[in-house]
Image (cartoon, rainbow, N blue to C red):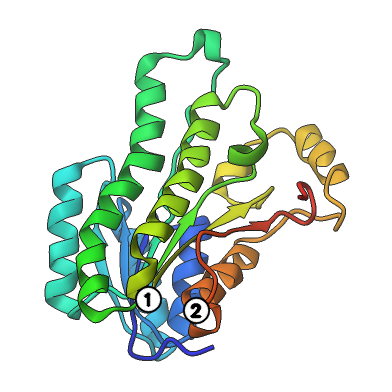
Amino acid sequence: MTLSGRVALVTGASQGIGRACALKLAQSGAAMALAARGQEKLQTLADEVAAAGGKAVVFPLDVGDEEQIKSTFKAVITQLGKIDILVNNAGITRDQLLMRMKRADWDAVLNTNLTSAYLCTQQAIGSMLKQRWGRIVNITSIFGQMGQAGQANYAASKAGLIGLTMAMAREVGSRNITCNAVAPGFIETAMTSGLADDFKQDAVKMIPLGRVGTPEDVANAVAFLASEEASYITGHVLNVNGGMLMG
């Protein structure tokens, strides 16, 4: 699979799944727009891409800020010429039982995880429509499919991403633009590293493949959906969960 000549923008690219996606897309030949709040980590990633012979430009971005999204996407198109591939990966958690959840924590998670994907897609879609080619990949979650106690805000945001994915797929399919989602299961990232060991052990028991996933497992799925080989796949949710949820 080659993405030579393509420009890909990944949100939340500074660490975890976003970082792995950016590296994989760069390895496949795409010029990278790296967007996240952590500028220092982004620069380290850009240097890594460059050392491997790729191209990457850093764009500091807080996806919770609509004006920052608008200005950043304009800057990406100005510097790199277009946006072919958009990976809406940025996400946060603010866990609490629903009966105790503060409205601010609900709003923060929905705004960062779901509203930002709508805003980013809105800013990127013009470039894709103009060239009649595009790939939108939204990073959802197994918990958007099966729910999770203490994560009503997170589960709702990730379920919303699935609905957004399917609606967008219908809207832009006739213009040779696909929109798909990747739903990771239990992946070893900074977001999951703080979980208790007994919780992790119980989770592994629920996974038929018998292991926790890696960010690279998710990145491989994203790169496939971004490729020409996936040109007849749209509106699809690709599960990367080791069999933890089937059907």
Mark 1: amino acid: Asn
Q: In the image, 63: left or right of 182?
A: left
Mark 2: amino acid: Ser
In x, y percent, where is residue 245? 76, 47
Residue 176's tag is 1
- Mark 1 in CB contact with mark 2 (< 8 angstroms): yes
For residue 59, above or below residue 103: below
Which residue was labeled with disc 2? 231
Which residue sits furthest front? Answer: 174
Foreground pick, 183 / 26: 183
Count neighbours of disc 2 (C-alpha within 10 A) and say few if under 14, some if 14 to 19, many if 20 or more: some
- Res 8 visible: no
For residue 171, above or below residue 135: above
User: What secondary structure is found at the residue carrying circle 2?
Assistant: loop
Residue at the image position 44 percent from the left and 39 percent from the top: 92
Count neighbours of disc 1 (C-alpha within 10 A) and say few if under 14, some if 14 to 19, many if 20 or more: some
Residue at the image position 60 percent from the left and 61 percent from the top: 215
Residue at the image position 47 percent from the left and 74 percent from the top: 226
Foreground pick, 204 / 44: 204
Q: Earlier in the sequence, mark 1 or mark 2?
A: 1
- Res 24 visible: yes
Foreground pick, 77 / 213: 77
